[in-house]
Structure formats: structure tokens, C-alpha cells
Image: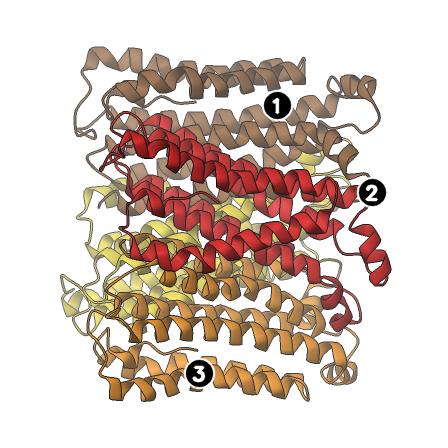
Chain colours: A brown, B yellow, C orange, D red
Amino acid sequence: MDRTRLEAFSDGVFAVAITLLALNLTVAGPGLQHQLYEHRWSFAAYLISFFVIGIIWVNHHVLIKSIAVVDRTLLFLNLVLLLFVVLIPFSTATVAQYLPVPNGDVKVAMALHSGDVKVAMALYSAVFLGMSAGFGLIFEWTLHGNHRTVPLPPKAHWPARLRFVGGSGVYVVAFVVSLFNAIAAFILIAVVAVYYIVERTPTSSAAAPDSPDDAEAV
Amino acid sequence: MDRTRLEAFSDGVFAVAITLLALNLTVAGPGLQHQLYEHRWSFAAYLISFFVIGIIWVNHHVLIKSIAVVDRTLLFLNLVLLLFVVLIPFSTATVAQYLPVPNGDVKVAMALHSGDVKVAMALYSAVFLGMSAGFGLIFEWTLHGNHRTVPLPPKAHWPARLRFVGGSGVYVVAFVVSLFNAIAAFILIAVVAVYYIVERTPTSSAAAPDSPDDAEAV
Amino acid sequence: MDRTRLEAFSDGVFAVAITLLALNLTVAGPGLQHQLYEHRWSFAAYLISFFVIGIIWVNHHVLIKSIAVVDRTLLFLNLVLLLFVVLIPFSTATVAQYLPVPNGDVKVAMALHSGDVKVAMALYSAVFLGMSAGFGLIFEWTLHGNHRTVPLPPKAHWPARLRFVGGSGVYVVAFVVSLFNAIAAFILIAVVAVYYIVERTPTSSAAAPDSPDDAEAV
Amino acid sequence: MDRTRLEAFSDGVFAVAITLLALNLTVAGPGLQHQLYEHRWSFAAYLISFFVIGIIWVNHHVLIKSIAVVDRTLLFLNLVLLLFVVLIPFSTATVAQYLPVPNGDVKVAMALHSGDVKVAMALYSAVFLGMSAGFGLIFEWTLHGNHRTVPLPPKAHWPARLRFVGGSGVYVVAFVVSLFNAIAAFILIAVVAVYYIVERTPTSSAAAPDSPDDAEAV
């Protein structure tokens, strides 16, 4: 079984999920300029989710390229990853719905600490955590049974895993933080996305395409 | 005519259908935590439909790989399969809409035996049955006229068909059960999905990729 | 410029359009069984549109395979075809919205002859006509300037064109009929779709894959 | 890292975005013919956005073909382009929502100069500008570091850039114009789209497929 359809199906799901994100952006009624301003958290959530899906797509791209064999186990592990990718438009829409409060900055600040916003942000973090864990499962699978075209030496397994736990760890932290302060968790997730795009890109593009350095989770 | 575009189009439909599933997950109004709890049946229906589409995609993958010739008959049989795949977001949304009852566990239990829930679950089972039957038609087509790259010996036809009837049979049973008890039919469909993922995966991944054992309906 | 991305993009649009069809199928409120019955015209419209898109996809598949050169003109003619394909979920939803009348058979019969239903059905026919004309434009383009890998002899041009005018002609007739009787136009479109699937398939699958016989419009 | 998945993912996003455009076309209530007339601006906006996405897809097609190396930087620059492509259905729906005014031509004319319409059209122009700038970033990237299979001579860099600034410049002008007269900005964007399709197509199809002339922004 070759990689072509696994990639085609996954790319399709990534492409649809990333495009559906913007489907939840809707404004209505008079005062468009004011409304766009009030939806600023929706746009921020859209932006972050867009790049998180983009980053995981790039990493998925690199990881699947390093794989020698496609079996049913991989196909179903991939489904677990996609299960959470598909939930991102839902969690983003939920965050966008509970973050904006239309009546002034004071109420916004209050709302950002109220119960519903925290639950929405916990859901947002949990879906990213699920996606990251699904990606970690695929990576773990590649470490065993000659699944990689170029096997990773055993002593490199733990460093590689730690990098993945580090990636997923951010979302665990964001989940816990969201229970206390939603906006702090939101900023944490945004900062990590920016870090992955700006900071890791030059290093990774210099590395070999199927080196473990390139295949890191978000 | 080659398999490439048949696979590309089918993968596109599978990918869009599986992603649209989550489009029906929406929460609104105050009390997000409580609302997420009340939508638990929606999430369960989403989860089951996601993996049923995932399983049929994997099986479709394997079955199309075994095919030597792509003709118009196959293209239209494939359309019959996709016709029902495309209906899954609709049937899932319908089940999700009629299953949750917001006012306490007693009413949930009652609702699960009321008329509308049974009709919704019958529809849910019927769409899966149509999908399974569409897949069975493609499989039947592969058995005849040198359509497989490696022909299946005639004595293996009936065992292979029985496995397919077995697959479709589960949905016939679920359809009948749904007329009496919706939740029992729901659990039956969920159990079969779990069985296909957990139980069949190791066996199947050990088998040859285009052996009939691998190409089983759901 | 190769055919790969033309096919990939077109397949993507076909796949999304065919899947979005079912997005307009929604039921709500008590009395699910009765509601499903009242939406029977929606389901019929869904079914017809699904197979019309399916048929045009199969024909597109065959036609693009016969092409030797992909230039900008072809890319934009292809966009004209896709412009109307993308409108099919809209025209189908409009027909489905204006066809069903919930209060008894007499009113249904009356509604089927009222003004709005006729306009909806004229729109439905017009979108299919636009799609068919877009396909005809691509076919016309293939006849000139060494665009086919196997050129069609000039004496075969008019018979081939007539077949295409015949295909588009059905939608012209359906458009005119819809102004007098919506249901008659609906049945005409349905019958032609069934004819293309059932009647043409065996003949076409026997013919050479890139013969002009195979590449007929709907 | 090869171009295949970059193209597949991008084609998927383009295909979904172009198909979702029509999802915002909805009519309801009695008087369908009148309603379709009142939605004429929605249909115009749909038409323009469809062809703008189509043009950028064709240009993306040509530009990616000229690339020798796919690295992480390109993948993220491509994400910036797609970020704005995905926003086009949203900006189109916003324009379509604020342009039509149902109560006679005088009010339409007035509405077209009112504040909300200008903001909607400024948003519409800004999203196209972002898309065009994203495309320009990819083009700029191709000019450096042996990224093209056939390098562009340095003296050709500025003419090529000017053509891109020219493309993006139209949207800057449209943005400024929209602050004074929404309909004028709308017509400007439409005229440029028609120009790119009708005027540039013959020239470009005569040129070599990976010449810089072919890869121009919109």
C-alpha cells in the first residue's frame, strides 16, 4: 500500500478543515465597522487555528515522507489525528462565540475570566492537545518495526520523544492555564504558533527533509 | 482509463464528508459546560460516523487497488457508494438533533424510546446500510470479467460475499433494532466500528494488501 | 503545463460541490417521519443533482484525458464549467425550498404550478444548461489546433457537436417546459440523468476510452 | 521535499474556497423572481470572487511549476497566500449582505454610498490585496537562492516586480476608492478580473509555461 492516497485523503481533510474555519466568520446588522471590531477575538482565533493547522500539515508532510510502510495501523492512527483536526473549526467557532462581548472593554475583561470563556478555551486547548497527541502516536509508530525508510538510532528515540512531549506539553499547560485565565492560555497558544513558524523554519529548512528534527509536533 | 482520478474524486468526497460531520456540532447560549454535556449524544454520533467513514475509506483504498480496469460501470457503482457517504453528515445531524434531550436523565431515557428518535436511528442505520450495499456492489463487480489484477478463485467467491453480507447484515440488524430501541441500535453500530478498527487491523495488516481478506465492507 | 493540477482542482470542486448538496438537507421539529415525507422533493432534487454532477465528472474525466495541451484558454474554459457546477448546490437548495408544501397533496399540486416553483425550476434548468454549455465550450476547444492527442477527423466534428447540442438541448427544453409546468421539467431532467447512467454506460465502456463517443455532455 | 503535496493541499484549499462562495447564495420567502433580482449584487460579487480565485489558481499553478526547491519558508509563505484565499468567501458574503437594498433603485443608489457599504467594499478589496501580497511574497522568494529551475536574470527582477506591484496596486487603488464610492471600487475590481482573463490569456498561452511573464499576480 503506497502513501499516495493517505496523503491525498489527509490533504483533503486539512484543506477542508482550514477553509471551514472562515465559514464561522459572519457579521450582520448595521454598524459594520463596529461589528468587525467586536469580532476581533473571532479573527484572532481564526488566525491562530489557521496557522496551527498549517503547521501540523507541514509536519505531517515531513513525517509521512519518512515512512517506508503504510499499513492499517498507520491508517487508523492517522484517522485519530484527523479526528481532532476536523474538530478545530468547531472549537474555534466556540471560542469565537464566547470570547467577544459587545459592550465595552471592561465587560470584555470580565468575560475573559468568566466561566464560559474558560470552558471554551479549555475545549480549544483540548482539541489542539488531541491533535498533537494523535501526531505523537504516528511518530511513535514510525520508531518501531522498520517503519522508517531511514531508521532512527535507539539513543535518538528519547530526545525525539521529548521534543514531541514538549510540543504536546504546551497544550497541556494551555489547558490548565485556561481554567484560571482564558486570555493567558489564548496568548500562550498564539506565541507557540508564531514560534514554530518564525523560529523553527530557518533551522528546519536547512536540515535534511526526513531528519527527525524536521518532524516535530505542535 | 486509470485509477488516479477515481481515487482523487473519491478521496475528495470522503474528505469533505468526514469534515462536514463536525460542522453540525454547534453550541450557543450561556452555560457552555452544561451544554457540552447535553450534546454528548451529538459527539458520540460524530465519533461513530467519523470512524465508519474512515473504515470505508480504508476498505475503498484496498479494493480499488485490486482493480485492473476502470470502466463507466465502476464509475457509476462508485457514485452509488458516494451517494450514501455524502448523506452521512445529514443522517448524523438528524440523529444528533433528536437524541439529546436537555431536561434531565429520565426524559433522555424516555426520548430514546419515543417515535422520532427511532425514526432518526432508522435513518442513520439505513444510510450506513446503503453505503455498505454500494461497497458490496463494487466488490461484486470486481469478481467478474477480469476486473481484478489478481483474480479470486470461484470457490472463494461465496466466502468473500458472505463476509460482505455479514458487514451489511449488521446494518440490517441495526435498522430493525432501531424500530424497537434506538439506543441499542446506536450501541450496536458503535461496537461494530470499534471491532473493525481494533480487532481486524492487526490481522489485516499482516495479510497481503490486495488479498480479499483485506477488502471487507463495514 | 500538465493535466495533473487541472484534474486535481476540478476533482476538488466536483467533490466539494457534490458533498455540499446534502448540506441543504435538514429536518427539524417534531414528527420526523412526516417531515421526511414532506421533504421528498428535496431528496429527489438531491438525488438528481448528485447524479448530474457525477455524470459530468465522468465525462470531464474522459474529455481531459483526450487533451494533448493544457493552455490558459483551456484553464479559463474549465473555470466557466466549474462556475456552474459550483452553483448546483444553490439551485438544488432553491428547488428543494420551493417545491415542498407541507399542507396536503392538493396544495402540493397547486404549488407545483404556481409562479415561484416555475422560477425555481427554470433556475435549476438554467444552471444545468450553463454547466452543459461550459462543457460544450471545452469540447469545441479540443476540436481545434492540435489540442487532442488523437485528432478527430473534420467530418466527425458536426456529428460530435450535434451530440453536444443534443445534450444541452435537453436543458433548453427543460427550461422552456419549466415556465409552464415545473414538475414536467423536473421529470424530464431526471429521465435524462437515468438515461445517461443506464443506457449509455454499457456502450461507452465498450468503446475506446478517448473516442469522441465517450465524451458526451449532459 | 517535492511539490506534489504543496500543490495538492493548495488545490484543495482553492477548490473548497471557490465552492463555498456559492454557499452564501440563499433566497427565501415568496416572490422568488423579485428576490433573485434583489440579490443581483450578491451574484455579481460571487462571479467576481469566483474568477479572482480562478485567476490566482492559474497563476499559482504556473509559479509553483517554476520552483526547483520546496522548503519550509515556501510552505509558510504559501500559507499566507491561502490565509487570504480562505477569507474570500467571508468578504464576498459581507459585500453581498451590505450591497443589496430591497426597496427600489433610489435607496440602492443611496446605500451604495452609505458607510457600511464602503466598509464592506474596503474589506473586500483588503482581502484581495492580502491575497495578492501573499502571492507577491512567494514570487519574491523565487527570485533568490536558486529557487527557480530556470533563474531569472537580475536585470529582469525589477520589471517582474513592477508587474506584481502593478497587480497588487489595483487593489490598493480599489481600497482607497471604496472609501469614497463602493460601486466604483466594485467595478474596478471586476474590470481587472475581466482584463486578466480576456486580455492576458492569448499572450500568456503563447509564452513559455515557466517564463516570468506567465506568473503574474492579480
Task: Please tell me in which quadrant of the rendered image residue B217 appears.
Answer: bottom left
Q: Earlier in the sequence, mark 1 or mark 2?
A: 2
| Chain under callout 3 | C
Same subunit: marks 1 and 2: yes
Label 3 packing within 10 angstroms: few (<14), some (14-19), many (20+): many
Numbered tag placed on residue A30 in the rendering = 2
The residue wearing badge 1 is: A122
Location of residue B61 in the rendering, given as x and y in whole percent from the top left corner: 30, 52
Callout 3: SS: helix
Looking at the picture, which amino acid does disc 3 mark? Gly
Location of residue B66 in the rendering, given as x and y in whole percent from the top left corner: 21, 58
Callout 2: SS: loop
- Foreground pick, C62 / D201: D201
Label 2 packing within 10 angstroms: few (<14), some (14-19), many (20+): few
Looking at the picture, which amino acid does disc 1 mark? Ala
Callout 1: SS: helix
Q: Quadrant of the N terminus of chain B?
A: bottom left
Looking at the picture, which amino acid does disc 2 mark? Pro
Measured Cα–Cα span from mark 2 to mark 3: 47 Å
Q: Nearer the viewer, mark 1 or mark 2?
A: 2
Q: Is residue D30 above or below residue D78?
A: below
Asked if the residue at tag 2 contacts the one at tag 1, i.e. Cβ–Cβ closer than 8 Å, the answer is no
Measured Cα–Cα span from mark 3 to mark 1: 55 Å
Residue D197 visible, this orientation:
yes
Location of residue D62 in the rendering, given as x and y in whole percent from the top left corner: 34, 46
Residue shown at 38%/37% (left/top)? Answer: D160
| Chain under callout 1 | A
The residue wearing badge 3 is: C167
| Chain under callout 2 | A
